[in-house]
Amino acid sequence: MVTTTALTNVSPFSLEDWMQNPPEHTEWVDGQLVEKNGVTLKHSRIQANLAISWGNYKDSSGQGGQVYTEVPCCTNKQGRIPDVAYLTPELITQFGEPAVLPQSFPLIAEIVSPTDIAEEIIAKSQEYLQSGGEEVWLVFPENRWIIVITQHQRLVFISGEVASTQSVLKGFNVAVDELLG
């Protein structure tokens, strides 16, 4: 996840407008088009590491599906762009590859920046879970934590431990230090 800034010089833009053609590097939040900014080299490296790890695992385990980075989806009330997302084969069959997925991805990761506000990040993870998401990873590079959240549990994995999926991409695991390296 990166810091967002409201775009004030933009003509009125509805969620439906955003879903038809989301402007690059934007989310639609609380009735406003906001720009995602604040991506660093570390953020991008961790994003790529996780996308590659999930992608390799979905192939080697035979679970299939597709892994995406910075891909738009619609929650029950917002237009979001998760840092990393996994779409199951069943949902690919159901939706194909629309411009914007009309629900949350089953597995989402947000890489938290030092300027992100904890309450907003937690609210965003709950928003994903209430909109079709099954599992959200909140990755804290500076603290070397990965918090895995599902509807029924919250797990914290720290440096020296191995983080694992709980409900989507069953069996995937990665050393926290390896991912955040």
Image (cartoon, rainbow, N blue to C red):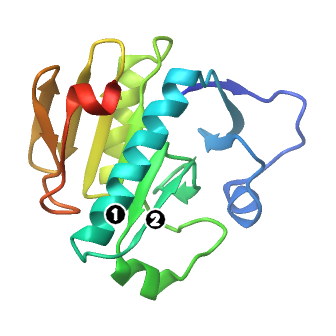
Disc 2 is placed on an element classified as: loop
Residue at horizontal 43 percent and vertical 16 percent from the top: 117
List x then y, in percent, for residue 47.
Answer: 46, 38
Q: Amino acid at mark 1?
A: Gly
Residue at horizontal 14 percent and vertical 29 percent from the top: 157
In the displayed structure, 33 sits above or below 130; it is above
In the displayed structure, 44 sits above or below 102; it is above
Residue 90 quadrant: bottom left
> Which numbered disc covers residue 114?
none
List x then y, in percent, for residue 45.
Answer: 49, 32
Looking at the image, residue 171 sits to the left or right of residue 37; the answer is left
Disc on the earlier residue, 2 or 1? 2
Looking at the image, residue 111 sits to the left or right of residue 71; the answer is left
Residue at horizontal 28 percent and vertical 12 percent from the top: 143
- Residue under pointer 2: 103
- Residue under pointer 1: 132
As measured in the structure, the alpha-carbon distance from the residue carrying label 2 to the one carrying label 1 is 6 Å
| Crowding at mark 2 (Cα within 10 Å: few <14, some 14-19, many 20+) | some
Q: Are marks 2 and 1 in contact (CB under 8 Å)?
A: yes
